[in-house]
Amino acid sequence: MARRASRPAAAPAEGPSRRVLVLGCGALANELQAIVGTGGLEHIDVECLPAKLHNRPALIAPEVRARLDRLAQQGRTYEQVLLGYGDCGSAGAIDDLCAEFERAHAAGNGPSMTRVPGAHCYEFFATAPRFDEMSEAEPATFYLTDYLARHFDLLVWKGLGIADHPELAELYFGNYRRVVLLTQTPDGSQRARVEACARAGAERLGLPLDIVETGYGDLETTLTSVAAPRRNTVHSELAAPRHNDEHQVPA
């Protein structure tokens, strides 16, 4: 079972030299940019790793380490790092990496590191109590985020091979009873587009669709708890067209 990270306490603001990095999943790039851009968080730098790492979650922690090493070689060092990931199927490897960095930081070597609490983006967008309530109400639920709804055909229908082998649809989704769209999009026209994509996806699966407005949930709460006055830059490597959210592979 994936481990939940505790919510980080707000760090004390120190001064203009303190730097904070949010290193997140490329599937969350739009959400991270929106939170930073509208929240007055100019002190935070944002970097994103490719969203396709969720197809191979064992690589997430090594890729996080590699990106931090690369940034350090470029002279970009940080006092604090927030990972824009849940456990994300890493079997605790992301938490182990955070613990390693925390021990080093306590010894005066390198940045502190924590992650967004929750097993995955579905949980931290909805928040743990609400996600648990939905899961208990109907365990056989396939969840969509805005990103996965927009790219349903690419990441689900084609990504799982159903486009070429339609018989796989029953294998993957035969035990599901509903689709739930967890939507973050506040804009009306964008929301309509996302909901239309989710509805089309649910129809292809032959399942009813429920829509739950979550906003950014614990992603926003955790990110805004990071206090350190600094500039903001954004660098993202996305696995799909613009508008990126973490995606899910059915069990």
Image: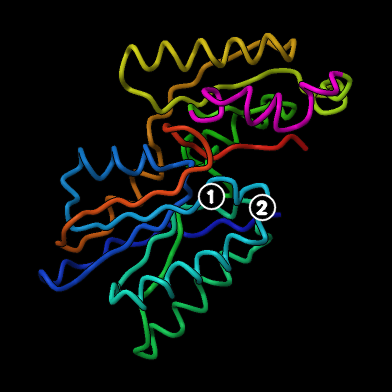
* Earlier-in-chain disc, 2 versus 1: 2
As helix, strand or loop, the secondary structure at mark 1 comes to loop
Where is 71 relative to 144, above or below?
below
Question: Residue 48, which numbered label?
Answer: none
- The answer to which quarter of the image holds residue 229 is bottom left
Marks 2 and 1: which is nearer the front?
2
Quick check: 104 above or below 93?
below
Residue 66 in the image: state x and y as whole percent.
Answer: 50, 70
Residue at x 41%, y 44% (from the top left corner): 218
User: Which range is magenta?
Assistant: 147-166
Quarter that holds the C terminus? top right
Q: Quadrant of residue 80?
A: bottom left
Measured as percent of width and height from the top left, residue 143 is found at: 62, 28
Residue occupying image coordinates x 69% and y 18%: 178
Q: Which residue is mark 2?
A: 89
Q: Is residue 13 magenta?
A: no
Q: Residue at x 68, y 27 (%)?
A: 142
Q: Is residue 169 left or right of residue 141?
A: right
Q: Position of residue 146 (x, y in %)?
A: 48, 27
Q: Residue at x 27, y 61 (%)?
A: 10
| Left or right for 120, reference 165 | left
The residue beneath circle 1 is: 118
Disc 2 packing (10 Å; few <14; some 14–19; many ≥20): some
The x, y position of residue 245, in whole percent, is 49, 37
Amino acid tagged 1:
Gly
Would you say the residues marked 2 and 1 are in contact, meaning their CB atoms lie under 8 Å apart? Answer: no
Q: CA distance from mark 2 to mark 1?
A: 11 Å
For residue 62, what is the image quadrant?
bottom right
